[in-house]
Image (tube, rainbow, N blue to C red):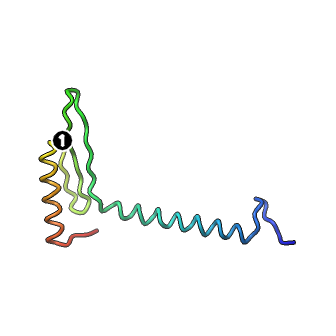
Amino acid sequence: MSARLGIGLEPSSLLQVLNQKLGELRQLFIKTLSRECELRVWCVDDYTGNTWWSAYDPTTEQAIYQVSETQIRVWIEQRHHLATRNSASC
């Protein structure tokens, strides 16, 4: 008969669960770090029904606020071309 822990799991089972949870935590940590480099884009609707777009680029620390869809597209394309040319990364 093997020793049981107070939580109803065999020690080997507990180690498996802990390893699984640590792996999940590691993946979450890596995802969180990689998100720091991603362009953030959001929109808001004003009281008249117009949609205004904003974005923030953490790699350059530049932002644009409350612009049209066309303007945000141009801004994003400019960021993409700069990043491609400069091979910018976090």
Which amino acid is tagged 1? Gln
Residue under the point 52% across and 63% down: 25
* Quadrant in the picture for residue 19: bottom right
In the rendered image, residue 28, in percent from the top left (x then y), is placed at 47, 62
* Quadrant in the picture for residue 85: bottom left
Q: Residue furthest right?
A: 1
The vertical placement of 67 against 33, above or below, is: above
Residue under the point 20% across and 52% down: 63
In the rendered image, residue 32, in percent from the top left (x then y), is placed at 41, 61
- Decide which of 16, 34 is in the foreground and name it: 16
- Secondary structure beneath disc 1? strand
Marks counted in the figure total 1
In the rendered image, residue 17, in percent from the top left (x then y), is placed at 65, 65
* Quadrant in the picture for residue 84: bottom left
| The N terminus lies in quadrant | bottom right
The vertical placement of 45 against 89, above or below, is: above
In the rendered image, residue 55, in percent from the top left (x then y), is placed at 23, 50
Residue under the point 76% across and 67% down: 10
The vertical placement of 35 against 71, above or below, is: below
Residue tagged 1:
66
Answer left or right for 26 relative to 71: right
Callout 1 crowding tier (Cα within 10 Å): few <14, some 14–19, many ≥20: some
Answer left or right for 62 relative to 18: left
Residue under the point 72% across and 72% down: 12
Answer left or right for 7 relative to 36: right
| The C terminus lies in quadrant | bottom left
